[in-house]
Image (cartoon, helix red, strand yellow):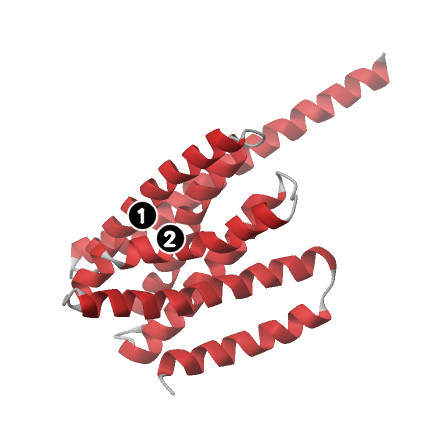
C-alpha cells in the first residue's frame, strides 16, 4: 500500500466516525471536509495517470495537468450538493471552504511524507500558502454560484468562466512554487496576502452592515 493510501485511511477514518456521530450543520461541514480529502486523493491518481500517458515529469504535470484535474474534481462535491439538494444561498461558501480545507490538508500531509521538510519555516510557509491558494480557488468558483443564484443558465456560464480563472491562478501558483528563491517565496506568500485582504474587506463590510442595522433599530425605538 502506497503512502498516499495510508494517509487517506489515517485522515479519513476519524472523519467518517465523526460524520456518523454528528448531526445538523456540523455533520454537513464534516462531510464536505471529508469530500475535500477524498477529492485530493483521487486527483493525485488522475494527475499521475495523465502525466504517465503524456510522458511528462512531475514539474510539468504540476503546472499543466494538476490545476485542471484538482479544480474540476474539487468542484464535484459542490455540484452534487447543488443538483441533489436545495441549499440556501448562504450555505454555499461555507461548504466550499470546508472542501478546500480538506483538499489542502491532505495535499500538505502527502507533501510532508514524500518530500520531508527543509525547515520548520519552509514547512509553515508552504502549509499556509497551499491552504490559502485552495481556499481562494474555491472562493472564486463559489462566487459564481452565489452571484448568479436563481438563474441556472447564467450560473452555469459563470461557474465555467470562474473555473477557468481558478485553474489559471492555480497554475501560476504551481509555476512559482516550483522555482527556488524569491519566485517560490512570492508564490507561497501571495495567496496568504490575498486571503488576508479578502477577510479584512469582508470584516469591514460586516461591521458597516451592523452599524447600519443598529442605527436603524435605534431610529425605530426613538420613533
Q: Earlier in the sequence, mark 2 or mark 1?
A: 2
Would you say residue 116 is visible in this rendering? Answer: no
Residue 145 placement, left or right of 41:
right
Circle 2: element type: helix
Residue 107 appears at what percent x and percent y? 38, 67
Q: Nearer the viewer, residue 43 or 103?
A: 43
Is the residue 19 above or below the residue 189 in the image? below
Q: Residue furthest top?
A: 223
Residue 74 appears at what percent x and percent y? 43, 56
Question: Which residue position holds label 2?
Answer: 71
Residue at point 57%, 78% (across, down): 13
Quadrant of the rendering where the C terminus is positioned:
top right
Is the residue 167 above or below the residue 9 in the image? above
Q: Nearer the viewer, residue 10 or 72?
A: 72
Would you say residue 130 is visible in this rendering? Answer: yes
Return the mark for residue 32: none
**Mark 2 to mark 1 CA distance (whole Å):** 6 Å
Estimate how packed mark 1 is, as few (under 14), some (14 to 19) or many (20 or more) residues with alpha carbons within 10 Å. many
Dividing the picture into quadrants, the one containing residue 220 is top right
Residue 223 placement, left or right of 36:
right
Query: Pointers 2 and 1 in contact (CB under 8 A)?
Result: yes
Quadrant of the rendering where the N terminus is positioned:
bottom left
Residue 179 appears at what percent x and percent y? 16, 60
Question: Which residue position holds label 1?
Answer: 167
Residue 194 placement, left or right of 34:
left
Residue at point 55%, 31% (across, down): 205
Amino acid at each position: 500500500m502506497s503512502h498516499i493510501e495510508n494517509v487517506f485511511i489515517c485522515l479519513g477514518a476519524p472523519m467518517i466516525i465523526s460524520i456518523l456521530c454528528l448531526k445538523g450543520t456540523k455533520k454537513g461541514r464534516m462531510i464536505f471536509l471529508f469530500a475535500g480529502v477524498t477529492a485530493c486523493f483521487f486527483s493525485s491518481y488522475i494527475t499521475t495517470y495523465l502525466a504517465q500517458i503524456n510522458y511528462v515529469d512531475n514539474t510539468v504535470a504540476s503546472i499543466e495537468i494538476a490545476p485542471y484535474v484538482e479544480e474540476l474534481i474539487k468542484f464535484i462535491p459542490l455540484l452534487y450538493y447543488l443538483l441533489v439538494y436545495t441549499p440556501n444561498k448562504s450555505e454555499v461558501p461555507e461548504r466550499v471552504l470546508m472542501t478546500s480545507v480538506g483538499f489542502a490538508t491532505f495535499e500538505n500531509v502527502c507533501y510532508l511524507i514524500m518530500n520531508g521538510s527543509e525547515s520548520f519555516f519552509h514547512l509553515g510557509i508552504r502549509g499556509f500558502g497551499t491552504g490559502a491558494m485552495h481556499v481562494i480557488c474555491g472562493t472564486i468558483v463559489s462566487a459564481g454560484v452565489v452571484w448568479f443564484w436563481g438563474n441556472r443558465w447564467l450560473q452555469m456560464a459563470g461557474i465555467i468562466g470562474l473555473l477557468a480563472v481558478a485553474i489559471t491562478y492555480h497554475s501560476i501558483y504551481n509555476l512559482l512554487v516550483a522555482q527556488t528563491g524569491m519566485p517560490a517565496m512570492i508564490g507561497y506568500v501571495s495567496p496568504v496576502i490575498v486571503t488576508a485582504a479578502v477577510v479584512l474587506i469582508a470584516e469591514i463590510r460586516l461591521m458597516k452592515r451592523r452599524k447600519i442595522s443598529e442605527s436603524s433599530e435605534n431610529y425605530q425605538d426613538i420613533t
